[in-house]
Image (cartoon, coloured by chain):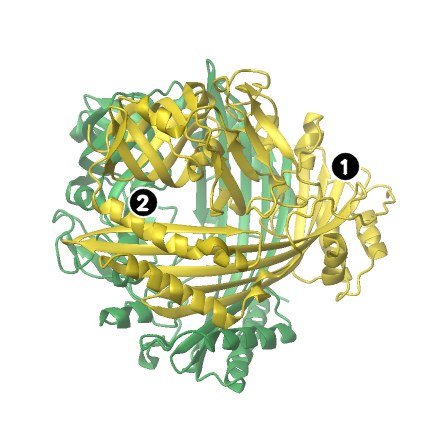
Amino acid sequence: MANPTDLALNTLLAPAELKESDLDRVMDQLLANHIDAADVYFQTGRLESWVLEDGIIREGSYNIEQGVGVRAVSGEKTGFAYTDEIRLPSLLEASRTARAIAQAGQQARINVKSVATQHQLYAPISPLETMSEQEKIDLLRRLDAEARKQDPRVQQVIASLVAAHDVVLVAASDGTLCGDIRPLVRCNVHVIVEQNGRREQGSSGGGARHSFQFFLDEERALGYAREAVRQALVNLEAVDAPAGAMTVVLGPGWPGVLLHEAIGHGLEGDFNRKGTSAFSGKIGQRVAAPGCTVVDDGTLPGRRGSLNIDDEGVATQNTVLIEDGILKGYMQDKMNARLMGVQSTGNGRRESYAHLPMPRMTNTYMLPGQYNPEEIIASVDKGLYAVNFGGGQVDITSGKFVFSASEAYLIENGRITTPVKGATLIGNGPDVLTRVSMIGNDLELDSGVGTCGKEGQSVPVGVGQPTLKVDQLTVGGTSA
Amino acid sequence: MNDTNDMKQRSARLEQMVEDLLQEAKRQGASAAEAGVSNDAGLSVTVRKGDVETIEHTRDQGLGITVYFGQRKGSASTSDLSLQAITDTVKAACNIARYTTEDSYSGLADADLMAQEIPDLDLYHPWDISVEDAIEQAIICEAAALAVDPRINNSEGASINTHNGLQVYGNSHGFVGGYPSSRHSISCAVVGQQDDSMQRDYWYSSSRLAGELQSPEEIGRIAGERTVERLGARPIGTCQVPVIFQAEMAVGLVRSLLGAIRGSALYRKSSFLLDQLEQPIFPDFVHIHENPLLQRGLSSAPFDSEGVATGPKDIVAGGVLKSYLLGSYSARKLGMQTTANAGGARNVFVDSGDQDLAGLLKTMNRGLLVTEMMGHGLNMVTGDYSRGAAGFWVENGEIQYPVEEITIAGNLKQMFRQLVAVGNDEERRGSVRTGSWLIEAMTIAGQ
């Protein structure tokens, strides 16, 4: 398999007749005497999506995006400009604009040197071409049929198929020159069911850095259709959710959005450098119960949140955030790492060339513990069992976080009983994990659906966890 | 070259590009097409702890085309505006249209609905501010926030943003229209500490015209005051009480209403306001209207995203739902006429009552004032509502102490009917303008 760096050089520089020596010239111009670091980020992307609704292929769209972002950093100052023209004059103009952050002075000489990308966690393919258009729409039609055949109460099915192909190349003043070819596919099924005038919804999906074959393997896509209907039918029976603080058991996999919100964001380097995170200055302290070990791992093959290199050209890694309940480290990009006197952890990510990189999560999950999930449920007299979630949000500074259950049940006398309506759960990041009293042996990662938003930038991420029992969490139902 | 002439030339260039796109679509066999082209340039300066943090120069451009072959459609878009990209993008859209299904509801909006003339809505007022001046204003803004109270001991900084854009839309009915617009903002966020706990809050001002922005000093001061007011926040016990959504938060309730009467939510039967047209959904004192033609309005537009002429209309009158928000596709699906809301609602106003926020607090007497919400806990199909909240506990009509780590829950359909009063403390910074809302009862979950 060809190395992603070579492929990226060919895709991005060759058509513009740009050579590595031209990058040296841009870098030389960027580096005035007060500039500590600079980088140039080339990107070209293709995105294709198809939507089925009301039994027909209603929409399709194709997007082409390309450009170069140029950044100059001096201490805590950043200058940034970008252009959608991958041409030397535009690049030089953008770099003049970006370096205005510092006073111009004597020039440094930089020679970037291309290096092979260390990881190859996914094939350097364009997933758009891994299935013909006819096969894509046939797959959507099969999903529609599969959902409708599950139950006559299914009224509406919306199914979508999305593929993205991103080619990026990073040249930086520390000599970095490496690239990545990033395939990403996503499939989702959303259904509306109706019974005696009551309507409810259910939704399921998945994705990976893979070809479309991912959805055919193990009948994954058909599974999403069945799962969406199952959830919607459960919701038809749901009663009002309880309100107040109670024991909550979180299912495995996607409920790991708890970790993403409650602790993940608070452990991003930028907030901690600035001292604005509720976790600032807490390294070495207990922030979770013994047995809780949480990692951010960008190196899982094929995962939605994985990357061969981050958007600063640093190889991704498996970073231990919390080990046996003790806070071990933060997630860093180059700038925050330098200012805090540590190494980048390969978490420097950006939505596109038109956005500045910052520390972001990749795949964030908790390692498994020793309990069977059945034992955990059996240990609860009265509580909530939450298995599916929508999104969440966190206030980094106060530490308060929410995440919204979309499928949940009451636990009564150690048994899962009545389904309850969706409800938001709220807690305090720095202490919620100290209330974890049982950790399941059933670690699962989510199906590949996560998108994380921070300062207006969206990036794909993954989460995961085993079944977890949290002794006290506030459940925002209506039934007091 | 003066700015007006420059803008005319840019505008003519983009109009030509739209014509070229439509022409190319026809050449490639499309029976109808619509296209949009935009470009936008901006400056964003952020200062933190008295020194520059980031200077970002933004320049975004893009074109998009939708082609119809009979009633099959395909779309494509790109950030590359070269001649080659025009051909390639149209080709990509045509290729998609080979595979989408014949859909009897699809197509352009009707030709006779196209805007005949394009009124000048006074949306374009570029802010000729230098990077140095922007830095200075941001420093003044942040300093004002830090000076509010010694407990404010950290900052996320202050920002000055200015953007100018030009957008042109055209379709094969022969409609081509475009207009320039500007948008500027000043914002500030600071962090306060009391004992071991920190709070962050912010304030901002946003306008088409820099001269209408609140002063940097005022924005900083309000950001600082809001942060200090939150220090010492704590949860309250689980209870059922009246709730006031402060104007900024009430805007969110209005947006949920607008989401529930959108055509796409209605024809998909995924709205809690299905079949409610001409039905009472609020108490009879509630009036909500849309004015897309507001001069200098933050979401004003002379035509919608299908070229249909916009105009003012009632959304809710005397508590009764008077209009859905439809584009041509959802209108045909529902057997109705488009309401010129392709692309959304533009400048929505909730008529104010006669009480200010202090008056509403007196009317409520005991309950919760919500000043911040977290999460996305609204089920659009059922109206079930459950979100994280922070705010203030109110007794005897007066604020007692700040509250956090609680949720508020109810059902939006019921909450709308249980609206007791709308304040006159209008939130005016965005596309929805409303005062605070007092809701009769909601469930608070806390400790």
Give the colour of chain A. Answer: yellow
Chain identity of mark 2 = B
- Tag 1: Cα neighbours inside 10 Å, few (<14), some, or many (≥20)? some
Name the side, left or right, on which A111 lies relative to A472.
Answer: right
Q: Which quadrant of the rendered structure holds the C terminus of chain A? A: top left
- Is residue B189 visible in the rendered image? The answer is yes
The amino acid marked with disc number 1 is Asp
The spot of residue A289 in percent (x, y) is 47, 18
The spot of residue A159 in percent (x, y) is 39, 60
Q: Quarter of the image holding residue A285?
A: top right
Which mark, residue A302?
Answer: none
**What is the CA distance from the residue labelled 2 to the residue labelled 1?**
44 Å
Secondary element under disc 1, as helix, strand or loop, is loop
The spot of residue B25 in percent (x, y) is 51, 81
Q: Which residue is mark 2?
A: B251
Chain identity of mark 1 = A
Q: Is residue B190 above or below residue B32?
A: above
Secondary element under disc 2, as helix, strand or loop, is helix
Q: Is residue B274 above or below residue B421?
A: below
The spot of residue A55 in percent (x, y) is 33, 68
Q: In the image, which lettered chain appears green?
A: B
Q: Is residue A305 above or below residue B4?
A: above
Q: Quarter of the image holding residue B111?
A: bottom left
Q: Going 24% across and 37% down the picture, which residue do you hit?
A: A420
Foreground residue among B200 and A357: A357
Q: Which residue is mark 1?
A: A36
- Is residue A332 visible in the rendered image? The answer is no
The amino acid marked with disc number 2 is Val
Name the side, left or right, on which B149 lies relative to B116.
Answer: right
- Tag 2: Cα neighbours inside 10 Å, few (<14), some, or many (≥20)? many
